[in-house]
Structures are given as structure tokens and as C-alpha cells.
Image (cartoon, rainbow, N blue to C red):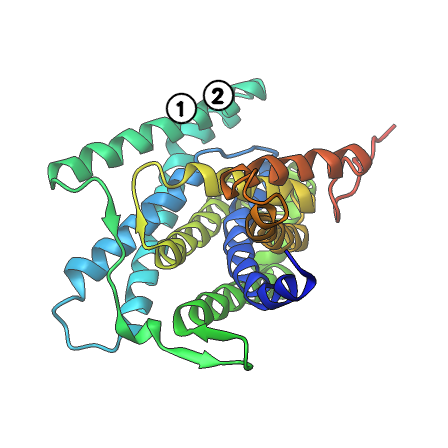
């Protein structure tokens, strides 16, 4: 591969990497918010993301398909339905699976095992439900509107699909940042994350804040699920696993529990993911294919954590004496 070939591929590689990175960032926020408040790694979040995506596809396929609505409005309805479904599901998971363990001060390993169990349960529940309708893989409806291109330069064109994903993801990230830093609810969430016992003493309902945190994280996961299905064209009951693992990697990369870190980690991981997938086969003359990119993606996490264990924007825990 010549230098000119590499430069020719660079704009579209950066664009695709940004789109994928923003998707990782939105999913990663679900992990980092729950961890920031409870210190719990909610591995069921990947399946909550998947459920939201499938709900959105079902709404587009059966709910708005016959309506004479603009595709953007149909997408907005699907995103709203997905966010509500995933948010409510996250609330249910917190209330049934996690809160009893927290109330009874279960060992920290127990909620982690429970999260894995909930993840497997949701996978099989969705697989069983979808099998009743005879279609295991749910294709994302094809809208001509989102295939229209905008010429950015003589060598780069963006379609409405990519632009829509970027705009929706950025708006959600900005809205969450505003919620956490400029509202009373955000201050309450940060207070509970810092010291739950002290928060309870000053009148904050800790259980309510935890539930709201799960709802927000789940809603963001549902939104990301629809956008992910839109980007890759389909979802199935196992679609949450790999993007969920990469989003968790992004959260750890940026600093688990740190919201700006999750955003940064997601974008960087998306750029690295697409970059390696694009250039690795070309640099090795197809001796190493795109399918090996995940080795390098997770290898990047190992390297970062060796030199910065708390992540890029994370802080090492301070022990009080």
C-alpha cells in the first residue's frame, strides 16, 4: 500500500470511526453511570442495549411502516419507544436482581454473577420471543431517505444515515452532560456516587437516585441499540455481546465511572477499531484480515491499563486514614 492509498482511505476511515466511536460512547455511559453510583459492573447492559434496538426495529417495521410519516419522524418515534423500553427494563432489573443484594449487603462478587445471569436470561428470553414470530434476525427497515449522500469534499461523501447517528449521539451526550452538571438531579446522582450514606443523611432518597440512574443508562443503551441496528442493518438476540464488550472496554479505557472518560474512550476506541480494520489487511497484503482487529482493540486496553491503570481520565482511588 502506497502513502497516497493510505491518504485516500483516511477521510472515510475517520468518518466511520467517529460514527462507531460515538455509538460505543453512548453504550459505555450505561456502564459508567451504574459503576459510578454503585461500583457495580452491569454486564446485563449489553442485553438491555440489544432489547432496545429490537424494540425500535419492531416499531419501525410494524408500528410506523404503514403511516405516511417522514422517515426522520419514524426514527424519532422508534428511538423514543426504544429508550422507554430499555429504561423500564433496566429499572426492572435493578429492582428485582440488584436491589435485594444491595439491601442485604451481599459480597461484591454476587452482583457480578447476578449480572451475568440476567444477561443470559435476557438473551434467551428475546430469542424465544422472536422465534414465536419465525424470524430470528431482525433487519432494520430500508429507508431511501437515509441513503442520500452529501458531498463533503471531492473525495468524501456522507450519507444521511451517518449524519443522523452522529447528530443524535452528540445531542444525547450533550444532554447527559447538562443533566449531570447543571441540574438538581445531576447533583444528587453525583452526591450518591461520592458518598451514599452522607447523601441519605441530607435527605436524598438513595434508592430513587439509583433507580433513576439505571433508567437513564438503560434509555441511552436503547437509543444506541436502534442507531447500531441502523448502522449495521440488523440485530439479533446476540447482537449485544460484542458491542457491549467494546463499550465496556471504552468505559475502562476512559476511566470507569467517569462520564467524560466514557465519551473519550468510546470515540478513541471507535477510531482505532475502524482504523485497524481498514489498514491491517492492506499493510499485511491480506495475510492478517479484518476479523483479527479485535485482538488489537483489546490489546490496546491492556497496554493503556499497564501504564495508566485508572484509565485516561480516571483517578486512582484515594484511601482515607
> Looking at this view, is 72 or 154 the one in front?
154
**Residue at the disc numbered 2:** 113
**For the residues marked 2 and 1, what is the alpha-carbon distance in whole angstroms?**
6 Å
Mark seen at residue 117: 1
Q: Measured from the top left, where is residue 166 in percent x and y?
A: 50, 67
Q: Are marks 2 and 1 in contact (CB under 8 Å)?
A: yes
Residue 5 vs 120, above or below: the answer is below
- Toward which corner of the image does residue 90 lie, by quadrant? top left
Which residue is at 16% across, 42% downward?
Answer: 135
SS at badge 1: helix
Q: Quadrant of residue 154?
A: bottom right
Q: Is residue 234 above or below residue 200?
A: below
Residue located 25% across and 52% down the image? 139
Counting other residues with Cα less than 10 Å from the Cα at mark 2, is it few (<14), some (14-19), or many (20 or more)? few
Q: What is the quadrant of residue 117 in the picture?
A: top left
Res 157 visible: yes
Quarter of the image where the N terminus is located: bottom right
In the image: residue 213, left or right of residue 234: right
Q: From the viewer's perspective, is 317 left or right of 46?
A: right
Amino acid at each position: 500500500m502506497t502513502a497516497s492509498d493510505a491518504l485516500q482511505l483516511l477521510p472515510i476511515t475517520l468518518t466511520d470511526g467517529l460514527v462507531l466511536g460515538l455509538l460505543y460512547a453512548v453504550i459505555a455511559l450505561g456502564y459508567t453511570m451504574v459503576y459510578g453510583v454503585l461500583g457495580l459492573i452491569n454486564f446485563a447492559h449489553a442485553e438491555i442495549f440489544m432489547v432496545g434496538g429490537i424494540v425500535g426495529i419492531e416499531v419501525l417495521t410494524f408500528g410506523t411502516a404503514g403511516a405516511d410519516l417522514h422517515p426522520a419522524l419514524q426514527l424519532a418515534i422508534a428511538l423514543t419507544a426504544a429508550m422507554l423500553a430499555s429504561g423500564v427494563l433496566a429499572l426492572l432489573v435493578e429492582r428485582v436482581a440488584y436491589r435485594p443484594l444491595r439491601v442485604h449487603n451481599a459480597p461484591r462478587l454476587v452482583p457480578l454473577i447476578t449480572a451475568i445471569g440476567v444477561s443470559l436470561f435476557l438473551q434467551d428470553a428475546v430469542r424465544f420471543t422472536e422465534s414465536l414470530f419465525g424470524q430470528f434476525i431482525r433487519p432494520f427497515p430500508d429507508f431511501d431517505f437515509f441513503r442520500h449522500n452529501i458531498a463533503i469534499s471531492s473525495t468524501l461523501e456522507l450519507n444521511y444515515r451517518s449524519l443522523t447517528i452522529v447528530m443524535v449521539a452528540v445531542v444525547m451526550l450533550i444532554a447527559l452532560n447538562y443533566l449531570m452538571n447543571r441540574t438538581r438531579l445531576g447533583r444528587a446522582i453525583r452526591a450518591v456516587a461520592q458518598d451514599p450514606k452522607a447523601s441519605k443523611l441530607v435527605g436524598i432518597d438513595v434508592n430513587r437516585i439509583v433507580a433513576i440512574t439505571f433508567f437513564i443508562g438503560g434509555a441511552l443503551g436503547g437509543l444506541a441499540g436502534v442507531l447500531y441496528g441502523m448502522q449495521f442493518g440488523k440485530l439479533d438476540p446476540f447482537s449485544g455481546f460484542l458491542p457491549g464488550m467494546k463499550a465496556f472496554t471504552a468505559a475502562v479505557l476512559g476511566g470507569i465511572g467517569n462520564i467524560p472518560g466514557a465519551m473519550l474512550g468510546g470515540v478513541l476506541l471507535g477510531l482505532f477499531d475502524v482504523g485497524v480494520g481498514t489498514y491491517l489487511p492492506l499493510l499485511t497484503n491480506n495475510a492478517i484480515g479484518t476479523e483479527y482487529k479485535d485482538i488489537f482493540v483489546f490489546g490496546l486496553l491492556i497496554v493503556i491499563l499497564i501504564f495508566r491503570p485508572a484509565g485516561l481520565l480516571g483517578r486512582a482511588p484515594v484511601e482515607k486514614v
